[in-house]
Image (tube, rainbow, N blue to C red):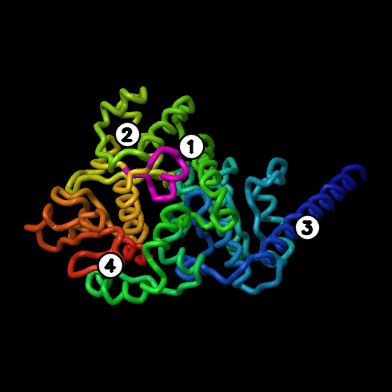
Amino acid sequence: MRTFLSIFVFRIEQYRKMDSLKEKSSILMSQLDMNFQRPLLQQINWENRLIGVLGSRGVGKTTLLLQRMKQMGLPTDELLYISLDDLYFATHSLSETAESFRKSGGKYLFIDEAHKYEGWARELKNLYDFYRDIHLVFTGSSIVEMLSLEVDLSRRAHVYHLPGFSFREFLTFEHGFEQTAVSLEELLKDHVSIASKFIALKPIKLFGQYTSYGYYPFFKEDITGYPNQLANVVNLTIGYDLAFIEDIDKQQIRKINQLLSSLATQVPFKPNVSELAKTIGMSRGTLIQYLHYLEKAKLVQLVYLEGKGLGPLEKPGKLLLDNPNLFHAISAQPKNAGSIRESFFVNQLRNAGHQVNLAKKGDFAVDDQYIFEVGGAKKNFSQIADIPHTYVAADDIEIGNGHKIPLWLFGLLY
């Protein structure tokens, strides 16, 4: 009798806690604004039973999950949002939570912050393999190699990557200006007519806003406090997320911060890796490995010389912060305009799916097809005059001419 009673009490308590999770999930979904939706929401094939959405801190992964739930229009008993950094999971497992949800009629489980739960990959694999009547969607940090774990998720999970806002998305989100994404080929061919639609908006002014605070959606909460919020995101990424990587030396965190701070004030940085390693007190191999980690964390962009291999010990030809907003969060010193321009250009092209390398002549080679120089309004073709398929991406101009294109237009690619 005592055993039966203890089991009964345990199950009652379990159902109560499950009800608490369901209540949190319903509240979050009901408070959500559906007016602005990221393109990825429509691009994901939601029919798959195991879906992963990866991205850096603050880019809107949670919002994407909740919008999908609201979009489905199903009874709340069939949908559940959980975050694996919730205190609930200090005493409960993901597996038992999923099983209880399924037994109560649940069909779609949306799992946030998966990488913060030890053993998450194995439990997800088991849930996917054992229960064919439940769909699982999870999010995780871009820094975690989600598909290179002790269990094989690569054959099961359909993984998507969510970047920060493009300049195009910022214009819609902040200023209500609708513009569909354009292809690179369309932009190169018709940039004058495309730019003419933006003249009344004063695009140079809005581009300045975007490069200062428009990449991460949480700027909407407090523009004035945005640099401090973003600095906290950077610190958490370095001090917390990097801890999930095997063999990383936590004593090097201060040195990594020093490295990022120096990138915010220098001209576009072509690193002498050996000298840089000596300066911040690391071995050459350790520094290169850390640079790869920082790139996965979406804090830096590593740009390699065209034609070079991308081996684990290959040094980058150029080192940039991942996006222009980071310059304002990482350092209070004067920012280098050239670095900000190149950071924006590489970020937008790569987020749109293009390959960007360091050109042997000129600044960047895109898709092994086009050569770009990136600079200010007075930038000309003198350095690339004898090369076919060359273009100048020029800052501080509203409309271009010929192969000279406004830099801000490259923010319409995704």
Residue type at mark 1: give it. Answer: Ile
User: Which region is colored magenta?
Assistant: 320-334
Q: Give the quarter of the image for residue 195.
A: bottom left
Mark 2 or 3, closer to the camera: 2
Q: Which mark is residue 184?
A: 4
Mark 2 or 4, closer to the camera: 4
Q: Secondary structure at mark 1?
A: helix
Mark 2 or mark 3: name the one nearer the start of the chain: 3
Q: Residue at x 43, y 56 (%)?
A: 155
From the viewer's perspective, tell me whether residue 390 is left or right of residue 8.
left
The residue at which mark 1 appears reads as: 238
From the viewer's perspective, tell me whether residue 243 is left or right of residue 94.
left
Q: Which mark is residue 288?
A: 2
Residue type at mark 3: give it. Answer: Asp
Q: Secondary structure at mark 4?
A: helix
Q: CA distance from mark 4 to mark 3?
A: 49 Å
Q: Which mark is residue 11?
A: none
Q: Which mark is residue 19?
A: 3
Mark 1 or mark 3: name the one nearer the start of the chain: 3
Q: Give the quarter of the image for residue 223.
A: bottom right
Is there CB contact under 8 Å for labels 1 and 2? no
Q: Position of residue 304 (x, y in %)?
A: 24, 45
Mark 1 or 2, closer to the camera: 1
Q: Secondary structure at mark 3?
A: helix
Residue type at mark 2: give it. Answer: Ile
Q: CA distance from mark 2 to mark 4?
A: 31 Å
